Amino acid sequence: MTIHVDVFGIVPAPQGSKKHVGHGRMVEASKRVKPWREAVRQAALDLNEPVIETACSVSMVFRFPRPKNHFKANGELKDTAPGWLTVKRNDLDKLCRSTLDGLSHTVKQGRSLLADDCLVVAIAAEKRYCIGQEQPGACITVIPINY
């Protein structure tokens, strides 16, 4: 069984640092993380798949919108525009963390696709700019591993 989760229309957000807000409380420094995790969770739940409670592999392709300076005045992509996203604050490992939390981190929120993200034993991931008319988001594939 292979499960494909497509998240469209939202820019992926990396799980960044936390900041101390007093009285021993820590919150996410980025306001984009919570909406991203919720979008991933909802896209996964919309599939109505049973909760995965066994080892699994996960592959993720993160898509980001191109900045305006990648385009010519006529709207065509410049020859010098990069294909891969290599800007700061979008570390691939942190994107994976926030996405896996969206697939599994739902004790207070109810059901999830993964019983726990510790079940993930293999990860393949890439980040790139949107191609053509693609929307920002992610394509996530989860494959349970049965030995």
Image (cartoon, grey):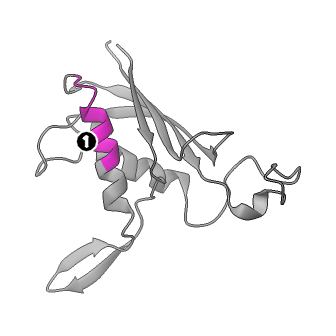
The secondary element bearing badge 1 is classed as helix
Compared across the picture, whether 36 is left or right of 25 comes to right
Asked if residue 4 is among those painted magenta in the image, a careful observer would answer no
Asked if residue 47 is among those painted magenta in the image, a careful observer would answer yes
Compared across the picture, whether 116 is left or right of 16 comes to left
Q: Locate residue 134, reporting x and y percent.
A: 59, 39
Residue bounds of the magenta highlight? 39-49
Neighbours of disc 1 within 10 Å: few (<14), some (14-19), many (20+)? many
User: Measured along the vertical axis of the image, is residue 53 above or below residue 19?
Assistant: above
Image quarter of residue 40: top left
User: Measured along the vertical axis of the image, is residue 76 above or below residue 26?
Assistant: above
Compared across the picture, whether 144 is left or right of 69 comes to left
Task: Say if residue 2 shows up in the picture.
Answer: yes
Secondary structure character of the magenta stretch overall: helix
Q: Nearer the viewer, residue 75 or 24?
A: 75
**Residue at 49 percent of width and 52 percent of height:** 93
**Residue at 44 percent of width and 33 percent of height:** 140
Q: Nearer the viewer, residue 131 or 144?
A: 131
For the residue marked with disc 1, what is the amino acid? Answer: Ser
**Residue at 32 percent of width and 37 percent of height:** 43
Q: Locate residue 89, reporting x and y percent.
A: 55, 66
Quadrant in which the N terminus appears: top left
User: Measured along the vertical axis of the image, is residue 31 above or below residue 114?
Assistant: below
The residue pinned by badge 1 equals 104
Quadrant in which the C terminus appears: top left
Q: Locate residue 77, reporting x and y percent.
A: 81, 49
The furthest residue to the right: 79
